[in-house]
Structures are given as structure tokens and as C-alpha cells.
């Protein structure tokens, strides 16, 4: 039985993470991780007619590039699994139309990338696919106008706000014993070994400019459940990496974990904090479904490959924010799915 | 290897479908399948403040009722997998908050139910969960105002229009050898034995009142790929059941299948045609993410259990329609995921 405990599972065959790619915006490219990303675009429309089309193109390009690095083509893909923040996940959907791969569309807001890696890991372990692409994206300009205000209004950020990352990341998973790609594997020592499925948590946050507070409880619960199911503690990880809690959400997470009886501060990092560094213009850091995958794909994976990190608990965090349900008086539920990624 | 061919997979352990439930609206309850549904609601707000909240409550209730029939509770669920048509899948998301089960959120428009059954089948076969709930919903009034026009405008239907079904359906999947529920299984002879993962197809349809035409090519391609991968033909099925092509889409599907070299007319049915019968008020039939699951859960599953149908190819069809991308001049891509459900 690959299920362990109530919420977690082991991937006994240890599916491999064999390639990755990222496309980010100019601001992300100018940040402290700038050199790690594969491509930093200067024109955030990519010369297309809309930001939405540009985001979809970035999603598509990240998948194509991750395959290209191995000498593979889209036709080699057994499955494409992913999503984004736009209504009807149009970035992923239109990218999937171009990529012509069997497509499993997800909606899990900013926890999409770990949801997709979870499903891909299970599919590979069960023999349902040999090669799966996991991808997610977001775009500052497409997301702001959908979730908050038109950019033209020049609305000022509140002290808890985060900046939506313009970025797309793709991670390729392959069965341990699958045929080596023409150019070999970009990563030879990275495997996904398990995970914990998230539960929707809601602490009653209604401020749409405070996603960190909405998501921190979901992250805390998923980490605590992972520890409970597996018997692990923070000491068993070199890194616990959350998606986009930002600075405020990180503080909240540390407090919530302390209440659960764990101190994770020494091993915890957050992609939303890493991507922009301490830039006052982004207030609490980065966010968006493209934040965690681009940071993980380009900054973290090479460090796992190199053995700098032996075992990482990667949990992207999603605020299931809806402008409509917010107007109807609902609070913001959130979810966090976790995967364990190891140097092997 | 459970993967067969390029797009399809076998579920060798034959996970069982053990229970189901449906909640539908008054108009659906008054249709030819009316007595099959578990609950037909009279007030489409359920006394709540909005149609969206009512839809979410129907989603939640369908899951609770499917469990209740077996003497199980939400805490027994290993995983809840599903989605709906509303932005950020708020019907599923808020229902998942109440159900407190590990939740995998999907967006695949009206093909959500078969996408969820596919994933649940793989998860059960791989030992990642023992009991999974697959569910999807839609609501005429919440969907019309999001995708088309405010109901208050009284916009007239075009000749190819379909009426969005108010309904939610849930199907419970369990491992073959899993412990029998307290009240036994509602269905003892129904298994999911495989499926075919859909690819996004786009034939350039731009008419948002002609979903049948947008979805028929995706259905045809998935059926043809299933035949190609498995060596099966229409004769191997008692029923090929599409989700919500409606009358116009059904005609298109038959023509497209003829071009692929197959005549499926004798074994093909469509949930969108079945749910309202020949009611001129609904023009081409029903549609919506709740159409296929409510018809399948309440009308088709008992017929498979009884042996009336020995093998069914069930493919819900999703138009990945976005009001925004339509305004930006894009056509409507579509996808269809198929599962094979057998009397065993």
C-alpha cells in the first residue's frame, strides 16, 4: 500500500525528475535568482495581442524547453498536467492545444505545481505514463486585472500585498527505469518519493490583499499532517519550501507551526520571498501560480541534483480566491499540496 | 505496464464503483429521467443567498449522500476529486472546505467527471487511496450569468443552444479488495477498467451558443484513439455515452466518426439529450459539468449493475470556453476524457 497515514503517500519506485525549464518576466529576471531562470522576457506581451496570450505562450515554451533540453519533443509526452490562475485555466488550456499532448487540467490556484507533481508521480508509479510534464504559470498583468484592479487605476499596494510573478515553470518526471532521453537526463539524482494531499482550510481571512495570511494555515496543516503520517520532523529535511506565503505569511506559518509543536525556521524558505529578495516595491514578496514552479525548476532543482539539499518538502500554497465569492461575503479558503523531493 | 497505446490505459485491478448520488433542479427532475435522481430541488437557491452557494451545497450534498448510502462518513474518504464550471471552481472548493477531505481540484469544464474518475481509478490501482469520491456540478443560473448574459436580460436562445443543467453528481470508487462499507455496496458488479486521456482539440468554433459543435471533434478524436489503442470497435460496447453534445453535437459526432471509419449510431447516447428529452424549450438539450455526472450516477450506473449494459465507454466532453478569450478573438478549444465502465 503506497498510502501512508491519512493524508500521505509514498512513491516506492521513486519517479525521477529529469528536466525543468522556466520563463520569467523582466522584474523576476532582475531579481536575486535572475541568472537561474532559462529565459527572462523583456516585453511582457511577447509581441502578442494580450497578456493572457503571452502567459499561455510562456507556459507552452517552458514545456517545450524542458523537453528540448533532453532532445525530446512534445510527441514524446505521455501526459501534460497543469493549470494557472486565469478563469477556465486558459493559459494552460491554450498551451495544451498547441502542445497536442494528453492533458489533465487542474485548478488549485498557486498550489497547482505540487498538485500536478503529485498526480504525475502516482501515474508514473502505477505505469500509466512514462514521461509527464508538470507546469504552471501566472502573469502579473493578466492576474491583477482579473483578481483585483485594472492596472491603469494605479491602485497602491497595502502593507500585506504581494506581487504576482510573471513566470512559468515546467518539471519533467520520468519512470526510474524508463529509456534515457537522446541527450540524457538534465538531472540524474533527483526523485520524487512521496507527498501529502492538501485539505481546504479557511481561517476566515477576507482581505484579498493578504494572501499570505489566507494560505499560511493550509501550509501549516499540510506540514503537520506530513509529519504525523510519516513520523518525520523538521530535522529530516534540509529544506521545507513553501510556494508564495511571502514575508507576512512566513511569519504566520512559523507561529502556527510552533503551536503544532514544531520549529521549522531553520529549514524553511519561501519561493515568494526568494524570487524578489528584499525589494520594497513588491512589499511582502512574490505570489502567483508561476512563482513556485519557476523558483523550484531553476533555482532549487540544481541544488538537489548537486546534493546541497538531500531531502526537500516542497509545498506550493494556493489561495482559492474568487472575486465573485469575495463580493458575496465569503472568506478565502486555501490549500497546500506537498511533495517530497530527494537527492538519490 | 498499465498504459496501452499512446493515449489509453488499463486498470488491471478493476477498481469498483460502489455508490453514487445526484441532486438536480426542478426542470431536470420533471424530465424523463426525473425519478432516477436522488433529489430534485424546488427552490434553486436552496434558501441560500446566491445560486453559487446553492450549487456548492448541491456538490457537497451529492458527496455526502453517496457516502451515506454505504453507511460511511466524509472522514472515511481517502480523496475527493472534482470541479465545476465557475471561476476558480468555487462550487467544488467551498464544498471541499465543508467536507474536509484531501482534495484534488480539477478544471476540465464539462469533462470534469470523467477526468476525476480517470485519476481516481489510477490512484486506487496504485494503492494511493482506498476510497475516492468523484464529483462535478453546474447550475443554470450561476453558469448563464458567468458565461453568457444576465438572466434578467431574457436573451433568446439560438437554434444550437443548450440549457445548462442544474445538477451535481457523485460517484464513489473503491479498491476491489477494500473493506466492505457498513451497509455493503450500492453497486456490487460495476468496475472501471480503463480509459483514454483527452487532447485539446480546436476546430475553430467561435459561437459561444454552439458548444455541441465545439465539443464533437474532441469526442470523436477520443473515441477513435480509444479504438486505435485498444483494438476495440463500436461492437465491443453496449453504450458509448457522451456528456453533453446535445442534438446538434450528436449529429456532428456521428458524421465525424463516419469519417474515422466507424458507425457508432446504434450504441451512442448523449446525457445532454437524455436529461430533458425532446423539450423544445431547451433547444438542443442539456449541458454543463453537472449533466454527465447526474445522468451517469443515477440513470446509467443502475443499468450497468443490472447487466443491461455490459461495457460502456463514458466520455464527458468539455468546451474550454472562456468569456475573456472569446472577446480576445480566440476560438473554443474542447477536450473529452473517456473511461471504460463494465458489468463484472
Image (cartoon, coloured by chain):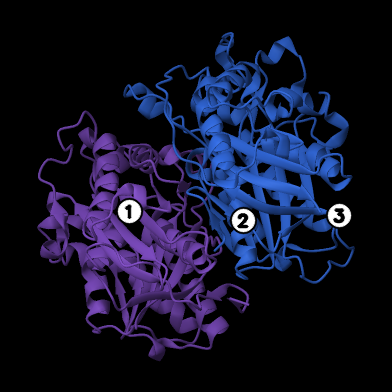
Chain colours: A purple, B blue
**Residue where numbered disc 3 is placed:** B186
List x then y, in percent, for residue B57.
68, 45
Q: Is residue B28 left or right of residue A65?
A: right
Q: Which residue is mark 1?
A: A288
Q: Is residue B243 visible?
A: yes
Measured as percent of width and height from the top left, residue A34 is found at 12, 62
Element at label 2: strand
Q: Residues within 10 Å of mark 1 (few under 14, many from 20)?
A: many
- The residue located at (70%, 53%) in the rendering is B192
Closer to the camera, B129 or B198? Answer: B198
Residue at mark 1 shares a chain with residue at mark 2: no
Q: Earlier in the sequence, mark 3 or mark 2?
A: 2
Residue under label 2, please give it. Answer: B10
Up the image or down, B258 lies above or below B293; here it is: above
**Residue A272 appearing in the image:** no
Q: Position of residue B247 (x, y in %)?
A: 65, 17
Q: Are marks 3 and 2 in contact (CB under 8 Å)?
A: no
Q: Which quadrant of the figure has residue A266?
A: bottom left
**Label 2 neighbour load within 10 Å: few <14, some 14-19, many 20+:** many
Which residue is at the far bottom? Answer: A235
Q: Is residue B193 above or below residue A114?
A: above
Discs 3/2, front: 2
Choose mark 3 or mark 1, whichever is in front. 3
Q: Is residue A245 above or below residue A50?
A: below
Amino acid at each position: 500500500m503506497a498510502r501512508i497515514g491519512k493524508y500521505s503517500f509514498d512513491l516506492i519506485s521513486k519517479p525521477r525528475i529529469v528536466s525543468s525549464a522556466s520563463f520569467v518576466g523582466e522584474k523576476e529576471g532582475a531579481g536575486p535568482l535572475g541568472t537561474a531562470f532559462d529565459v527572462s522576457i523583456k516585453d511582457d506581451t511577447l509581441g502578442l495581442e494580450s497578456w493572457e496570450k503571452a502567459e499561455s505562450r510562456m507556459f507552452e515554451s517552458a514545456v517545450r524547453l524542458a523537453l528540448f533540453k533532453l532532445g525530446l519533443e512534445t510527441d514524446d509526452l505521455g501526459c501534460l498536467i497543469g493549470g494557472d490562475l486565469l478563469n477556465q485555466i486558459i493559459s494552460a488550456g491554450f498551451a495544451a492545444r498547441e502542445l497536442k499532448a494528453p492533458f489533465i487540467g487542474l485548478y488549485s490556484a498557486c498550489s497547482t505545481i505540487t498538485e500536478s507533481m503529485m498526480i504525475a508521480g502516482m501515474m508514473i508509479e502505477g505505469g500509466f505514463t512514462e514521461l509527464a510534464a508538470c507546469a504552471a504559470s501566472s502573469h502579473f498583468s493578466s492576474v491583477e486585472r482579473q483578481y483585483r484592479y485594472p492596472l491603469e487605476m494605479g491602485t497602491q499596494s497595502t502593507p500585506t500585498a504581494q506581487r504576482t510573478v510573471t513566470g512559468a515553470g515546467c518539471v519533467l518526471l520520468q519512470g526510474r527505469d524508463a529509456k534515457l532521453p537522446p541527450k540524457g537526463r538534465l538531472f540524474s539524482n533527483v526523485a520524487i518519493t512521496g507527498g501529502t494531499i492538501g485539505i481546504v482550510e479557511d481561517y476566515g481571512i477576507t482581505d484579498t490583499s493578504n494572501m499570505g495570511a489566507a494560505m499560511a494555515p493550509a501550509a501549516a496543516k499540510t506540514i503537520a499532517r506530513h509529519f504525523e503520517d510519516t513520523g518525520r520532523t523538521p530535522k529530516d529535511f534540509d529544506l521545507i519550501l513553501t510556494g508564495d506565503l511571502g514575508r507576512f505569511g512566513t511569519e504566520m506559518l512559523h507561529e502556527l507551526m510552533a503551536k503544532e509543536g514544531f520549529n521549522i525556521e531553520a529549514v524553511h524558505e519561501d519561493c515568494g520571498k526568494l524570487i524578489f529578495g528584499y525589494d520594497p516595491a513588491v512589499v511582502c514578496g512574490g505570489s502567483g501560480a508561476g512563482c513556485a514552479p519557476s523558483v523550484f525548476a531553476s533555482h532549487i532543482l540544481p541544488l538537489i541534483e548537486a546534493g546541497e539539499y538531500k531531502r526537500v518538502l516542497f509545498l506550493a500554497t494556493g489561495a482559492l480566491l474568487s472575486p465573485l465569492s469575495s463580493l458575496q461575503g465569503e472568506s478565502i479558503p486555501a490549500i497546500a499540496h506537498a511533495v517530497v523531493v530527494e537527492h538519490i
